[in-house]
Amino acid sequence: MVKQPAVYILANRKNGTLYTGVTSNLLKRVHEHKEEVTKGFSSKYKCKMLVFYEVHETMESAILREKQIKGGSRDRKIQLVQQINPEWKDLYAGLGL
């Protein structure tokens, strides 16, 4: 298994509830959210749509970016999504990592 650090945002619908996370295996982690493998915020609010992600060189940089995103406003998170995914499509199927 090749590890590729990434930061991601999940949503339950367009402009809905947002969940920000970090992982070393984006494909596997998003699948776990979709299947509600772990009970928590994302399963409670049905955040299953991958609407934003950034790939990083190191886990350290991914974690720093996650903290930056989480520390920002909701409006800033929505702007991040809108910049790369204005239609709020689920990007999961297109992951080619």
Image (cartoon, rainbow, N blue to C red):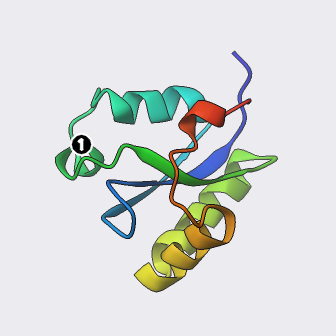
Residue 95: x, y in percent?
A: 66, 34
Quarter location, residue 74: bottom left
Examine the rendered structure and indicate whether residue 57 appears above or below residue 39.
Answer: below
Is 56 left, or right, of 31 in this rendering?
right
Quarter location, residue 11: bottom left
Q: Residue furthest left?
A: 44
Foreground pick, 29 / 49: 49
Image point 54% across, 62% down: which residue?
87
Count of picture labels: 1
Foreground pick, 38 / 87: 87
Position of the N terminus, as image quadrant, is: top right
Q: Residues within 10 Å of mark 1 (few under 14, many from 20)?
A: some
Q: Residue furthest front?
A: 87
Give SS at disc 1. Answer: helix
Residue marked by disc 1: 43
Residue 43: x, y in percent?
A: 24, 42
Amino acid at dot 1: Ser
> Taking the image as drawn, is residue 73 in sight?
no
Quarter location, residue 14: bottom left
Position of the C terminus, as image quadrant, is: top right
Examine the rendered structure and indicate whether residue 70 appears above or below residue 41.
Answer: below
Residue 30: x, y in percent?
A: 47, 35
Examine the rendered structure and indicate whether residue 34 appears above or below residue 61.
Answer: above
Image point 47% across, 70% down: which residue?
70
Is 90 left, or right, of 1 in this rendering?
left
Q: Residue furthest top?
A: 1
> Taking the image as drawn, is residue 52 in sight?
yes
Image point 38% across, 70% down: which residue?
15
